[in-house]
Image (tube, coloured by chain):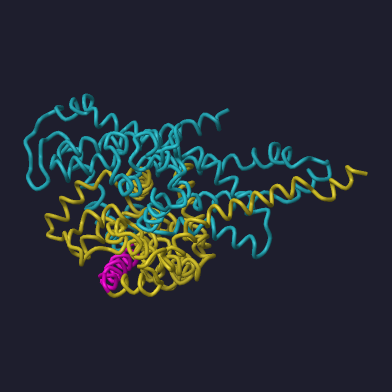
Chain colours: A yellow, B cyan
Amino acid sequence: MNAVWLKRLDVGGMAVSVATLVLIVVWAFPIFWALLSTAAPAGATGGFFRTYGYVLFETDLGRWYLNSLVTSGGVTAIVLAISSACGYAISQIEFTGRKLLWIVILGSFMIPVQALIVNHFFLIYQWGLLNTWLGVILPQLIAPIAVIVYKQFFDGIPKEYGEAAFLDGAKHWQIFLKIYLPMNWGVTLTLAIIVFIGAWNAFLWPFLAVTKPELMNVTVSTAQLSSNGISGVAAAIMAGLPVTIMYLLFQRRVTDAVTMSAGGNDEQRYN
Amino acid sequence: MDRQQNRKENLAALPLVVPFVLVYLALFIYPSLQMLAISFTDGALTKTGEWVGLENYGKLFRDRNFRAALLNTLYLVALTVVPGTLIALGLALVVKRLRGYWQAIALSVFFVPYILPVSTATSIAWLLTNTANGPLGGLVQSANGTVIPVWRSASWFMPAVAVLTIWWTVGFSVLIFLAGLRAIPTELYEAAQIDGASRWVEFRKLTWPLIWPITVLVLTIQLILQIRVFDQVYLMAAQAPNRSSTVLVHYIYSVAFQRNQAGYASTVAVALFVVGASVVVLQYQLLRLRRAK
């Protein structure tokens, strides 16, 4: 009798449910606390409008947003343009050195780019691009994931599509631009989101390439504000706001992109 | 005929491949080779140095700060990779069990920190662990009840960074595990339930072996990422003792940009290259060994 009652109650299931709730609360607590503290800070300096008003109007936040937007947008556009074309060529054209190029791309995935900061600094210094948007963009163009994902997707398209156009006298670059790329807008959008978020969140290189406060990305500038008490925290929250909104708008695409990037990683290990 | 065909293909590939190859040559291959070359010189940041042979490498082996940075990195790897992966698996199991809205909410809660830039994550960490009024500020205390400020403590710094790192980045691994769990056919679980298997037996005999390849994948990715860790460690280390908070990338940064020894910094960078690459090679060999069996 007792056992039946226990079974219906499902003690184990309830324990898991309670644990679930605890985990959710633990994970959400830091962000919740930060929002609460910046919206209604304890003490006399308080107030949502006071704190965020300060961040919006008394700091260079607008300028930092612009820097982040331009550099992340630039990284995204260039990475997608060069990677989609190259991914198409590796997937569809038997050119000399194709294997070697593929090995270099997979290799660059495993090697820590962070080790190259000194040499990237030399290069950007020699080109006179320190403290410029372009200088922030260039070293971030090494993003092998995009070309790996594009190659995989182009591999998956039935050859007949290209061959039919080929017989009609189309050139490879035309087939790429008019057939293969439009078939994969979903992939392009997904990659764009993940590359953009990655560039927006990049810290090390933008931190090295820029020393003038008005040219800093929002991630770098707000990292240095975090000692500024509650308004520093509010500024850092503002730095994360655009990417969070992006995630909330494109949830499915973002999570797909993340899983895809792991798949790309998988590919390089098994090839 | 064949050669002609080949030439045609090469010409067609050229405009598509050249932009990418140029970017890789200028920003990846060339800097990598230059790193190797400079590691044998005594160059400074804005001045080419003299060739000094293997001197920098000899120095590397005697350098106690380098050894400390290497050990700190490995310590953080030990504190984050395996625990982070297990926690991610746990969270993924929790998310998978939920239905509808609850599942979406739980997944978002675990994933959103991963989307945040490092400055947001570290600012929140400062706020929470502030010893004056942070809710977690008094968590770590010595035997007699004095509060220990974790970010200034030699022994607590790395564990605290590990907690921050796992909170911040676990969402990535949760997603990969979730995709893996969803790929397990539900019939298998139904069969197990018919056999009256308990939750634990179900996990032990069904989920764990089937999810193992994904676990290896997550472990590898985490290992590769944590060896090159910098951002959050550097930002939280503002008040920490150097010896216990500096990781490899941070050491490269301070040798190059604070001590202005680009040559020696490149030598340290080569060491990071070697550590990073050997992890991948080792992992690959293990995988081959397993498959050969």
| Image coordinates for residue A212, horizontal then vertical, percent | 17, 62
Q: Nearer the viewer, residue A64 or A50?
A: A50
In screen coordinates, is B166 left or right of A215?
A: right
Residue B170 in magenta stretch: no
Q: Where's residue A74, x and y in %?
A: 30, 67
Q: Residue at x 52, y 29 (%)?
A: B289
Residue at x-position 45% and y-position 72%: A182
Question: In this view of the protein, which residue sits in the foreground, A185 or B239?
Answer: B239
Image quarter of the C terminus of chain B: top right
Considering only vertical position in the picture, is A7 above or below A53?
Answer: above
Q: Quadrant of residue B47?
A: top left
Horizontally, is A157 left or right of B226 in the view? right
Overall secondary structure of the magenta section: helix
Picture quadrant of residue B265: top left
| Left or right: residue A56 compared with residue B288 | left
Q: Nearer the viewer, residue B72 or A159?
A: B72
Left/right of residue A118 with respect to residue B86 in the rendered view: left
Q: Residue B4 or B255: which is nearer the viewer?
A: B255
- Tell me where residue B32 appears, x and y as whole percent: 23, 43
Q: Name the image quarter holding the N terminus of chain B.
A: bottom left
* In this view, B293 is above or below B19: above
Q: Please state the extent of the stretch shown in magenta in the rendering.
A: A58-79
**Which residue is rendered at x = 27% and y = 57% of the image?**
A224
Residue A76, magenta (yes or no): yes
The number of discs equals 0
The answer to which image quadrant residue A38 occupies is bottom left
Q: Position of residue A237 (x, y in %)?
A: 39, 64
